[in-house]
Amino acid sequence: MWLRRVLLPSRGTLGVNSVKRSGGAGSLVAVAWLPQPACEFCKVDYTSSEDMQLGRREFVKYLLAAGAALTRAAPGGMPSGASLLASPRRQSGGANTGKTYDVAVIGAGVFGAWTAYHLERSGKKVGLLDAYGPANSRASSGGESRIIRMGYGPDEIYTRWAMRSLRLWQDFFSRANRPLFHRTGVLWLAGAEDHYARGTLETLGKLSVRFERLDRPELEKRFPQFTFGNVSWGIFEPDSGALMARRAVQAVVEEALKNGVDYLPEFAVAPGGTGHLAAIKTLSGGTVSAASYVFACGPWLGKVFPELLGERIFPTRQEVYFIGVPPGDRRFAPPVMPTWIFNADEVYGLPDLENRGLKIALDRHGPPFDPDTGRRVVTAEGVAAIRRYVAQRFPALKGAPVVETRVCQYENTSNGDFLIDRHPAFENVWLVGGGSGHGFKHGPALGEYVAARVTEGGAVESRFTLATKQKLQKRAVF
């Protein structure tokens, strides 16, 4: 975990045995859906074939225009852990570096890494803190792969963010010489009356995103690995695909360090008080001083700020499986096999990337999960359910071995919209998180957006504000 609020005992020093889960002196407190607007939301025109080429200024201009309208309308190369930490910008001597940063970013997952990267590129002096390390095994960004797709039903804002992010990911990988994007294409499977898929068709068409609408016979011809069952038609996004998640985040951090960001392997203590935050403390006894702070702590946000976010960030347990393919069988690898999503079954999958096996998981919220102590071993019931599904959807994989599993977490907000807002008690503290199972792909655009808000000011998109985050979950973003 990146940070927690630590209450020091009245006497003595803080040791392992003096830290408890809750209560008492010396304890450690672990610790809207957007209605489619009538049209000012869309007055900034990005519907030409140049959409994938949106520049930073135009992209931010679009978001500001969208926020204003809503306000008026609404009451490769792989960086190893050793190479990353051996970077000359790593501050190995603890947090007392004698520096005062323009911005300290707490959390080196995909949101924090890209925020730090963009802040440094804007000329800011940045410190990046993470107690477990970039894209560590407990982080929501720490998995093997993540989907990047443009489709979001009628939810245009996320399609635009995905378009911008795909361009930024590709530009970054090209500059860094790291082939961490696989252009597998993304296949949406749909039933006869799938309103989400129909909304996706309309949005992709409006924004000039390349896609193909495929009827059932065409699906069966092009993708014979599948048994389509209750699928009536589909949408294929040829330019979308998969990001190699853990290595991608580590690459962003490594490049940020090369450019001048300081990485501090520190466990930061959540701040107390109100007003202007001058410095944060670390569990090692150091301090980090900055003009502004961005807490991008993923599933730990509710532990860091329990009174504010403990009931508004919902980490859930999610099981992921890799199915072994038959020897010499390339039907389940790119370019023959796409990444695919079927919302009606709440299932998604990725092809056999880099010989790891066919990845498959349920896209439904699991039980509550503690990212520090949660048991990261899949259940027998989960294995049985996935085996049944694989046998039905991919007959050639009936009885195939499960060659790898993973338990990660979603860090959900009440409805799936991101959280990007100022802390109500601190004038110079930002809260960033709520990836909600779909956030990884958006890291570049989100980091760009957060960096602009921190450095340039301006109103926050209303969907991302703290005020819209409720205590009851009603998922609206998929």
Image (cartoon, rainbow, N blue to C red):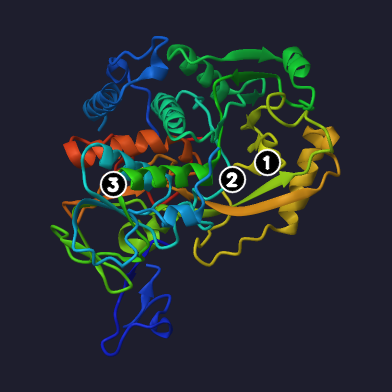
Pick the residue in front: 2 or 472: 2
Pick the residue in front: 362 or 54: 54
Name the element at disc 1.
Answer: strand
Which tag is nearer the camera, tag 2 or tag 1? 2
N-terminal-most mark, 3 or 2: 2
Name the element at disc 3.
Answer: loop
- As drawn, the label of residue 317 is none
Q: Disc 1 designates what residue?
A: 359
Q: Disc 3 designates what residue?
A: 260
Residue at image point 33% right, 72% down = 283
N-terminal-most mark, 3 or 1: 3
Percent position of residue 233, x then y:
68, 18
Percent position of residue 63, x then y:
29, 27
Residue at image point 49% right, 57% down = 82
Q: Quadrant of residue 445?
A: top left
Q: Quadrant of residue 56?
A: top left
Residue 371 lies, with reference to residue 52, above or below; the image says below
Percent position of residue 254, x then y:
41, 46
Identity of the amino acid at label 3?
Gly
Residue at image point 24% right, 27% down = 64
Residue at image point 28% right, 34% down = 461
User: How far, Cα to Cα, is label 2 from label 1?
Assistant: 10 Å
Q: Is residue 239 left or right of residue 74?
A: right
User: How far, Cα to Cα, is label 3 from label 2?
Assistant: 27 Å
Which tag is nearer the camera, tag 3 or tag 2? 3
User: How far, Cα to Cα, is label 3 from label 1?
Assistant: 36 Å
Q: Residues within 10 Å of mark 3 (few under 14, many from 20)?
A: some
- As drawn, the label of residue 144 is 2
Which tag is nearer the camera, tag 3 or tag 1? 3
Identity of the amino acid at label 2?
Glu
